[in-house]
Amino acid sequence: MVRSYPQNRNLNVITDNTYQGLGLSQNQSYFQQYLDDIIRVMNESLTQHAGVMVVRFDLHFKSSNVYGEHNHYDSAVITKFFQSLKAKIDYHYSKRKGDGLRAYPYYNFNVWAKEQDTSVYPHYHVALLIDRQTFSGLGPYGDQHQLLEVPRPYKCLSQMIIEAWASAIGESLVQAYGLVHFSSGGSLVMTRGDRSSYLKVFQKLSYLAKVKTKQFGDGTRSFGSNNAKRGLQVA
């Protein structure tokens, strides 16, 4: 069943258990356009890479933060995050290449949703889709000491994500560590031609398209994504 959404007539709501033959994360309402965007990003990532690592994490603000102006919480915050993350991954790529190590040209893809229920401030659900050959995993994201204090020749992806969020919201790394929550299991791998891995990833990412807790009417975006042409490309 499809119906228009009263608070935003540009969006359609579906209430089925599946979408285009793909299972959804929960039995609830979803925005059709957001599901279409998730499918597009997944397909584009598999066009560029035979194997894609999919990382799901949430970005939070400190409950005690008082920036004063509401526009500190608009979509510019998530844009700053992705810009910072791009710079860190670009540096990682350049450093490996400069050190004579194999560094694969890559495209990064992302999908994000901003939500707010009863909390004072919103939070972001984020999915990062990156070439599996660029990063083999997230790193020790569950161990603050190992992640932030133990020197290593190349930073792991979870460390870059935390550093990028710290930069975007002006917090210390220690504070930001507690504000970035990685999904259980860390990451999934999606392989070109493997229908089973595709179904698992879509089911996990469809959560970002749910209607519940999305906010409209404040002039900010509740959902966004990138593509290869305007996304995080390293040639």
Image (cartoon, rainbow, N blue to C red):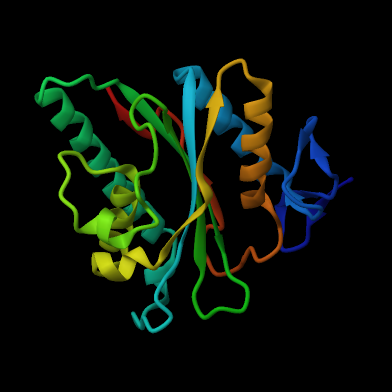
In this picture, residue 101 sits left or right of residue 60? left
Q: Residue at x 25, y 64 (%)?
A: 173
User: Can residue 132 be seen at all in this image of the molecule?
Assistant: yes
Q: Residue at x 78, y 31 (%)?
A: 20
Is residue 97 or residue 118 the one in the foreground?
97
In this picture, residue 230 sits left or right of residue 173? right
Is residue 64 or residue 197 the one in the foreground?
197
Q: Is residue 234 above or below residue 178?
A: above
In this picture, residue 196 sits left or right of residue 153? right
Quarter of the figure with residue 65: bottom left
User: Can residue 220 be seen at all in this image of the molecule?
Assistant: no
Q: Quadrant of the C terminus?
A: top left
x%, y% of residue 97?
A: 16, 23
x%, y% of residue 44?
A: 52, 25
Q: Residue at x 27, y 38 (%)?
A: 89
Is residue 21 or residue 178 the one in the foreground?
178
Q: Is residue 10 above or below residue 94?
A: below
x%, y% of residue 11?
A: 71, 50
Q: Quadrant of the N terminus?
A: top right
Question: Please, which residue is most extreme toward the right here?
Answer: 1
Q: Is residue 154 above or below residue 60?
A: above
Quarter of the figure with residue 216: bottom right
Question: Please, which residue is most extreme toward the left here?
Answer: 99
x%, y% of residue 153?
A: 15, 39
Q: Residue at x 39, y 76 (%)?
A: 62
